[in-house]
Image (spheres, rainbow, N blue to C red):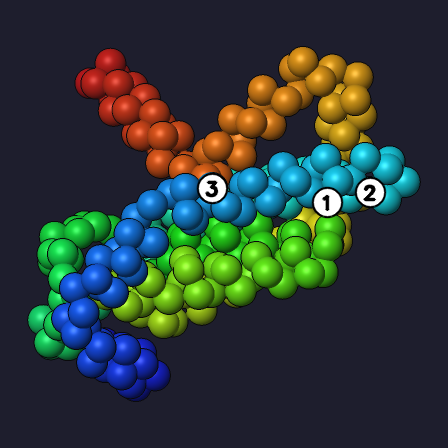
Amino acid sequence: MMNYFDFQIITFINQFSQHSWIFDKLIAFLSYNNLLKGGILSTIIWWAWFNSEDRHSHKREHIISTLLSCIIAIALARAFALTLPFRLRPLQEEGLHFLLPFGMTTTVLEGWSSFPSDHAVLFFTLSTGLLFISRWVGTFSLSYSILFIGFPRVYLGLHYPTDIIAGAIIGITIALLGNIYLVKNILIQSITNWSYSKPNLFYPLFFLLTYQIADMFDNSRSLFNAGAKLIRYIIA
C-alpha cells in the first residue's frame, strides 16, 4: 500500500508530465544513458585516483574501499529486492492513475521490484566514498546523484521517493562503513601496493570494475544469470 509521503510527492511531480515532449524525452534520456549516469562518476574516480599519488594521503585506499563497497552495495540491493515484498513501480500502479511521460510505457522493468532503488544504492555509495577523497568532489557527486540519477527515476514513474531514499541510506551506510573500517584492512593496503608494483595487471582490472559501475553491473548480472541457468540445465 502506498504511503502518504510517496503519494504527495509523486502526485506533485506527475502534474508536470506531458507538458513538454522535449522535457520528458530529456529526462528519459538522462535516466537511460549510462554514460551520463555511471560514466560521469566513474570518470571522477579515475581523476581522483591519479590526483592521489601521495602514498601518505591514503586516498587511494579510500578509492579501493569505495569500489569494493559498491560491489557489496549492489549485491545487497538485489538481495533486498528479491526477498522483500514485491512493490510495483508508480507507472504500473493502476490506483495511482500515473500520467506517463512521453515515450514511457507501463511494461518498463516489468517484473522487477521497485524497492529499493539499486541506482540510488550504487551511486550514493560511490558519491559518499568520494567525500573521503575530496569534500567538494563528493558534494558534487552527491548533488549529481540526486538531480540527474534519482529525480529522473521518480519523474518517469520508475521509483517512489522512498525507493530512492531507502537506496540512498543503504548506499551511504555501506560507504561509511567501508571507508571507516574496510579501509584499514591489510587487503586494501595490499591492493594499493599492487597498483604500484604491478600496474600492467592492476589497471586493466581497475578499468573493468569502473566500467561495470558505469554500466550498473548489467553485463555482470547477465553473465551470472546465464551461468546460473546453464548450471540448472546441466544439473537437471
**Residue found 56% across the figure and 27% down from its top:** 207
Please indicate whether residue 195 sits to the left or right of residue 104 in the image. right
Residue 80 — which label?
none
Q: Is residue 155 visible?
A: yes
Callout 1–callout 3 Cβ contact below 8 Å: no
- List x then y, in percent, for residue 4: 30, 86
**Residue found 41% across the figure and 37% down from its top:** 215
In three-dimensional space, the C-alpha distance between marks 3 and 2, rounded to whole angstroms, equals 24 Å
In three-dimensional space, the C-alpha distance between marks 1 and 2, rounded to whole angstroms, equals 7 Å
Mark 3 neighbour class, 10 Å CA radius: few under 14, some 14 to 19, many 20 or more: some
Residue flagged by tag 1: what amino acid is it? His
Can you identify the residue that label 1 sits on? Answer: 62
Residues 165 and 36: in front is 36
Residue flagged by tag 2: what amino acid is it? His
Does label 3 or label 2 sit earlier along the sequence?
3
- List x then y, in percent, for residue 50: 72, 35
Quadrant containing the C terminus in the rendered view: top left
Please indicate whether residue 97 sits to the left or right of residue 233 in the image. left
**Residue found 81% across the figure and 35% down from its top:** 53
- Residue 152 is drawn in which quadrant? bottom left
Under tag 1, what secondary structure?
helix
Name above or below for residue 195 compared with residue 185: above
**Residue found 75% across the figure and 40% down from its top:** 51
Name above or below for residue 26 compared with residue 15: above
- List x then y, in percent, for residue 160: 31, 69
Callout 1–callout 2 Cβ contact below 8 Å: yes
Can you identify the residue that label 2 sits on? Answer: 58
Quadrant containing the N terminus in the rendered view: bottom left
Under tag 2, what secondary structure?
loop
